Image: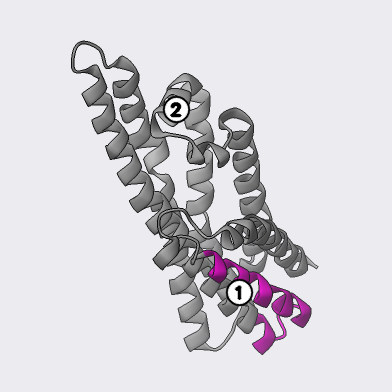
Amino acid sequence: MSVELVAAALLIAVPIAFNLAFFELSRAFDYPGILRKEPGEILRRFASGGAGLLIRWEVLLLSALAMLPLAALLGVAIGASPPLLVTSIVVGSAAALVQALGLVRWPFAVPELARRFVAAEGPDRESERRSIEVTFATLHRLLGVGIGEHLGYMLTGVWTLLVALSILSTSALPGWLGLVGVPIGVALLIGTLEFVGPNEEHGWQLAATIVPVAYVAWSLWLVGLGIALIL
């Protein structure tokens, strides 16, 4: 099987898997809206989700990791100049890793916190729960907001722009697909500013509104790249 066909298969399969897992988490866990709730409520909801919820998070995690081979194979399939090729592969791989690092807390760290939160009892129950809530909130801000979202959006946006530039510099794919990738990459970069500077505590609503739309467009763009590679 050629590099182009494998890259095309990943370009189609990965965004579909990611969005299906995201849809399932939204249906079963009210994600991402649940993240605006208090830590105690999130932990209780998580504890009641059972194994099915953990599997959904694992699928989302694996779909993020699948961007590693996707970034490498797509770069080879497009065949841009060596500096652009290497840069796009490195940035794309980094984007996949930080997205996965941001998600890995859900199937592994959060279950333990949720169990301890629900099981807390006795005279020290409230203080123990407050401690668990602080731990959860810290993990969420560091791994979720800082690494998964801020760095994840940033690297994914830069990778998207690099892929768009690669398409425009070669004849491997239609040039219009490169042009479409530019505003998508810019939108993802705007999303990195959601919790930066004065917006750190409550977030920037404009960025919060743009990101979901940008990721839907990004997913459709990847599928379009995959179809174009096959044709």
Query: Which residue does the image show at 37% across and 29% down from the upper left?
Result: 111
Magenta-colored stretch includes residue 165: no
Mark 1 Cα shell of 10 Å, populated few (<14), some (14-19), many (≥20)? some
Kindly report which numbered mark, 1 or 2, lies closer to the viewer in this rendering. 2
In the displayed orientation, state which residue is furthest to the left.
Answer: 124
Amino acid type, callout 1:
Val
Query: Which residue does the image show at 67% across and 81% down from the upper left?
Result: 167
> Hey, which quadrant is residue 81 in on the image?
bottom right
Let me know if residue 196 appears in the view: no
* Apparent side of residue 93 relative to residue 219 in the rendered image (left or right): left
Residue 59 in the image, given as x and y percentages of width and height: 53, 40
Residue carrying label 2: 41
Let me know if residue 200 appears in the view: yes
Question: Cα distance, mark 1 to mark 2?
Answer: 35 Å
Query: Which residue does the image show at 33% across and 36% down from the upper left?
Result: 109
User: The magenta stretch spans which residues?
Assistant: 167-191
Which of the two labelled residues, at mark 1 and mark 2, occupies the earlier sequence position? Answer: 2
- The mark tally for this picture is 2
Q: Pick the residue in front: 32 or 184.
A: 32
Magenta-colored stretch includes residue 168: yes
Residue carrying label 1: 186
Mark 2 Cα shell of 10 Å, populated few (<14), some (14-19), many (≥20)? few
Which element is circle 2 on? Answer: helix
Mostly what secondary structure, the magenta segment? helix
Q: Is residue 32 above or below residue 229?
A: above
